Amino acid sequence: MAHGAGGKATRRLVDGLFAPLLLGGAGTGLGDAALVELGGGPIAITTDGFVVTPVRFPGGSIGELAVNGTVNDLAVGGARPVAMVVSFLLEAGLSTEVLEAEVRAMARAARAAGIAIVGGDTKVVEHGKTDLMYVTTTGIGRPLPGVTINPRSARPGDRVLLSGPIGDHGITILLARGELDLEAGLRSDTRSVFPMVEALVAAAAPGLRWMRDPTRGGVATSLNELALDCGLAIHLAEDRIPVRDEVRGACELLGLDPLHIANEGQFLAVVAAEEADAALDALRSVPGGEEAAEIGEIHEEPASAVLVTTRYGGTRIIDMLVGDPLPRIC
Amino acid sequence: MKFVDEFRDPEVITRTAEEIRRLADPGRHYRLMEVCGGHTHAIYRFGLKDILPPNIELIHGPGCPVCVLPMGRIDDGLELGRRPEVIFTAFGDMMRVPGAHGSPLEHKAAGMDVRIVYSPTDALKLARAHPDRHVMFFAIGFETTAPSTALTLMRAKAEGLRNFSVFCNHVTIIPAIRAILDSPDMRLNAFIGPGHVSTVIGCRPYQWIARDEGKPIVVSGFEPLDLLQSIVMLLRQLAEGRSEVENQYTRVVPWEGNRAALAALAEVFQLRPYFEWRGLGFISQSALRIREEYAAWDAERVFDMAGVRVTDPKAAQCGEVLKGVLKPVQCKLFGKECTPERPVGALMVSSEGSCAAYYNYEHRKAAASLPVLV
Amino acid sequence: MCLAIPGKIVELSPDLPHLAVVEVTGVRRRVDLGLLADDLPGVGDWVLIHVGFAMSRISEHDAEEQMRVLRILGEDQAAMEEVRGYGLGEKEPT
């Protein structure tokens, strides 16, 4: 199904089906985490599902993706991750070693990320009905003071920041599937982005408009969603976007665009121009944030579009992903 | 990246663009066709149209093997894929091309065993790994890709591997160029010649274009500097009243072509008397079929193929757009019934098809009233 | 038909002479050298890769020559502009 790949079809599913029915029509500005008043202050809450083949890959596994993905959704929603629950759908006949390895990986990742796994559930389904293991999570967190995430607060002149190199996770998975006979020393970038978010908030909260972790569909999809939500334009400078050589090489070989490839340890932020330098310094001061970069700017025109300027002054519009990124030979 | 980054050097590109502006006669409107889909893609990817003067118009030609494949051939291939023992393999480019009942990707979602391969040898590997299944490779491409299919078939035969076959949809570039030039609506000044096809066939096969049709043609590489330098060379020919075949892509294209590749083609393939090209109709001697000696690996002979013919909806003007007679935006279905998400014609599916490229790069800019140098 | 990129041969297999490992900025893939059988490249040579096959050898000499020509073009331009800047009242060279 194209609907799960994170691009246009997913958005139509959410806007057209889920939002009206489940959110009482409040379909715009769908962030990764929602705020709920529970008396005694708001809580951020998020849910996510994790499906990945293969289950283990260089740099991580589905368990770590589940923990870090949940943590990151809360983080880019402007909240400190506190606790999460996990639900497993397991294929009958799944070896206990595989399951145990995943649970250990999750425990390690949760400790590293500072989130508590406080409960869970397991269901077993028939052999052949799942790719070994599906994991869903629900996470809660406490909103950081002074932070309001609102895509519609973006203004022309605001800067777009990116925490680090893109494409590592998606290309690692593609290569790990083994169908393309490519080898590279790449690892998934799965990690918690909360330390960077916390530093960014401390340095630039008043000017922080929006954050997102560009998972499925990549940077292009996340920024297109922002552009649609705020009605403004996002202009990126191609040579300022950090991409590792191996990712670039794999993308060239396969005819893919790094901007469409999934990431699991990066995030985007839009910050007012006055705070952008302080924000970038803050990101770079965090271990793992050294390659953070300012990659673009918000403009008026063209409305709701994302433009990339090439090194020679040419421009091209970069769209949301339609389906999964497919290698091409032409 | 070596042999790539140097040809993307911004300073040299700026200088070359200036030379183009200097050479282009302001009183003249230039219509240059790039035949090859890869050139179309490169032009959009690097935003080259923005740095050319407005009186140079780049027209996209029919060199996109996905775009010219008639829907019926996709249906034939998918029909084979429905057999439970068959593994349907194809390049990523094919996955979203719509047949009459859906694309390969949609068939995959519905349960068919469809796998993307990067090379025909990957399909061969699958056949070795699954002796109980039959691996069918849906082969597409011009002369760049056909030799690789040929070598793969030669290896399959040498190994006696019987659970492997090729559904051959390889086409040849020269008849397509001839069809363009024969078209009465055509008003082209010159051609940017295919780069990678030429590594196989060399530069000689284009001589009739320069000599008999009087159109300069420069065989071009794919980096921004390659394309810009080729345009410089074409402008110089036009200014000097010459029409010759020139090779800009000398670092890779040998004038005589690749003898071993041509030998492999001759060993495995022969020309079909005619073949249907989507949008261009039937063209004689324009496609390859597998020779008798390799019949055991020819999917069309191993299986009973229906030979479905599917006509495109009348409103779809793929043919005229393919020939460069119409701009994508002038097709009645463009942007309405036919979009990259719901493509009617293949020009909208393939990332290098004129319509998809135009939609993704120009259409939205035009809608936002940004300057569009078409 | 057109996506082909340059890669460097980093490994050859003695028992399978038509297969090589090619590297493109740190990404490795096995590539078939069958189409270059007439003049087999060796380790350190650069080839053009398309659908897992080496299509052609890349001539470093031609690449350098090409860049040289292009740079001269640029230098000619710069020289022209300097001359025009002297304002000697001469006609624009064509």
Image (cartoon, coloured by chain):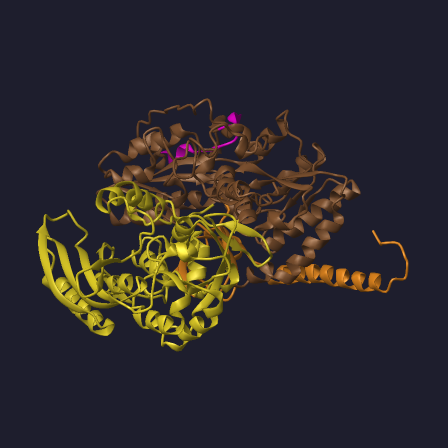
Chain colours: A yellow, B brown, C orange
Asked if the stretch drawn in magenta spans residue A160, the answer is no
Rendered position, B243 above or below A156 = above
A98 relative position to A148: left or right = left
Q: Identify the magenta region.
A: B279-295
Of all residues, the one furthest to the front in this rendering is A39
Q: Nearer the viewer, residue B69 or B27?
A: B27
The percent coordinates of residue B213 (x first, y second) are 69, 32
Is residue B111 visible to us here?
Answer: yes
The percent coordinates of residue A147 (x first, y second) are 33, 66
Answer with the quarter of the image where residue B95 lies: top left
B248 relative position to B327: left or right = right
Asked if the stretch drawn in magenta spans residue B283, the answer is yes
The percent coordinates of residue B78 (x first, y second) are 32, 33
Q: Nearer the viewer, residue B22 or B37?
A: B22
Which residue is rendered at x = 43% and y = 33% of the image? B338
Q: Nearer the viewer, residue C63 or B302?
A: C63
Which residue is rendered at x = 47% and y = 24% of the image? B315
Which residue is rendered at x = 41% and y = 48% of the image? A228
Q: Quadrant of the N terminus of chain A?
A: top left
Rendered position, A323 above or below B172 = below
Is residue B161 visible to us here?
Answer: no
Q: Nearer the viewer, residue B295 or C49?
A: C49
The percent coordinates of residue B174 (x first, y second) are 58, 35
